[in-house]
Amino acid sequence: MKKLMAANWKMYKNRADALSTAQELRKLVSDKLPEDREVLIFPPFTSIDRVAEAFSGAQGFHVGGQDYYLHEEGAYTGEISPSMLKDAGAGWGLTGHSERRHVLGEDDELVGQKTAYGLQQGLNVCLCIGETIEQRKGGKVQEVIDRQLAAGVRNVDRDLDPARLAVAYEPVWAIGTGEVAGSEEIEEAHGLTRKKLLELFGDKANEIRILYGGSVKPANVSGIISLDNVDGVLVGGASLASDSFAEIVLG
Ligand code: PEP
């Protein structure tokens, strides 16, 4: 199973900056990218085509959309569809990111609908889950993981190729805060995630990649990536500069 080294650029970068960052990243990484690693960037919608252009023909480099809606076209002002993302060059979609859950009000049901719909429409999907600090302090980590995962994949076809789905465990309290979950916390949460995926998908769950996200940096990535059940990372802040993300990808 290839490790998936993913970057979430959130609402940062204009088209020129996105293109140059992706070009620099390709230059820094492509000759050295190990066979068992893949790179995935989620730029803002406006730069998907530029990142796809920069990665064109490069083995192991992928582009995704940070969100999408539940229809292919229609009167849905402000929304974008999986086929529009694919048309712009994206092969992946992101669902359930904590900023969409907690800032933009998406609930478990909508996240589940989006996950299933994107997969049906031919995108690969990275589904994000993770508890808030209050939930952790209240001893609810397992409850949150079980609930968000069960709802997140409720309508996903159980015959799905497991390489098309990734789950990112991102404790909300570690996103953009500089505070990284400890090794034990990560292994425990990833173990619980694997257990629930096995319950939901059977043996093929061993081939669904589980990424860690939350203040990953060049200095901590090698420790994190070597933990049990960590099959990649999802990186926000430290993915915005090409040299920093290149170190993470190769770290
Ligand atoms: C994220 O946005 O998914 C994320 C993990 O952000 P950061 O790396 O900045 O914590």
Image (tube, rainbow, N blue to C red):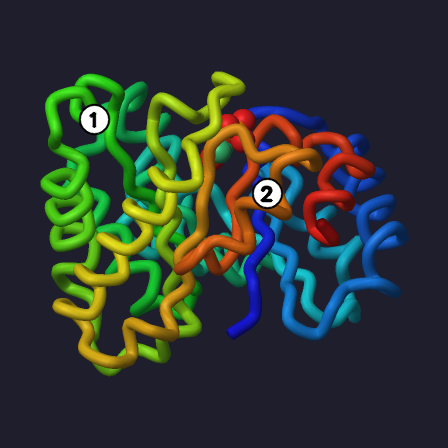
**At 19% across and 44% down in the image, what residue appears?**
145
Q: Is residue 161 above or below residue 26?
A: below
Q: Earlier in the sequence, mark 2 or mark 1?
A: 2
Left or right for 233, reference 96: right
**At 87% across and 50% down in the image, what residue appears?**
28
Which residue was labeled with disc 1?
136
For the question of whether residue 140 can be seen, the reply is yes
For the question of whether residue 10 can be seen, the reply is no
Residue at disc 1, CB closer than 8 Å to ligand 1: no
Give the percent coordinates (x, y) of residue 197: 22, 64
Could you say which disc has been placed on residue 7 in the image?
A: 2
Left or right for 101, reference 174: left
Badge 1: residue crowd in 10 Å (few <14, some 14–19, many ≥20): some
Q: Nearer the viewer, mark 2 or mark 1?
A: 1
Give the percent coordinates (x, y) of residue 80: 41, 44
**At 15% across and 38% down in the image, what residue appears?**
144
Q: Amino acid at mark 1?
A: Arg
User: How many discs appear?
Assistant: 2
Badge 2: residue crowd in 10 Å (few <14, some 14–19, many ≥20): many
Label 2 SS: strand
Q: Is residue 202 above or below residue 86?
A: below
Query: What's the CA distance linking mark 2 and mark 1?
Result: 25 Å
Label 1 SS: helix
Dots 2 and 1: beta carbons under 8 Å? Answer: no
Q: Nearer the viewer, residue 215 or 164?
A: 215
Residue at disc 2, CB closer than 8 Å to ligand 1: no
Q: Quadrant of residue 123?
A: bottom left
Q: Amino acid at mark 2?
A: Ala
Give the percent coordinates (x, y) of residue 48: 63, 47
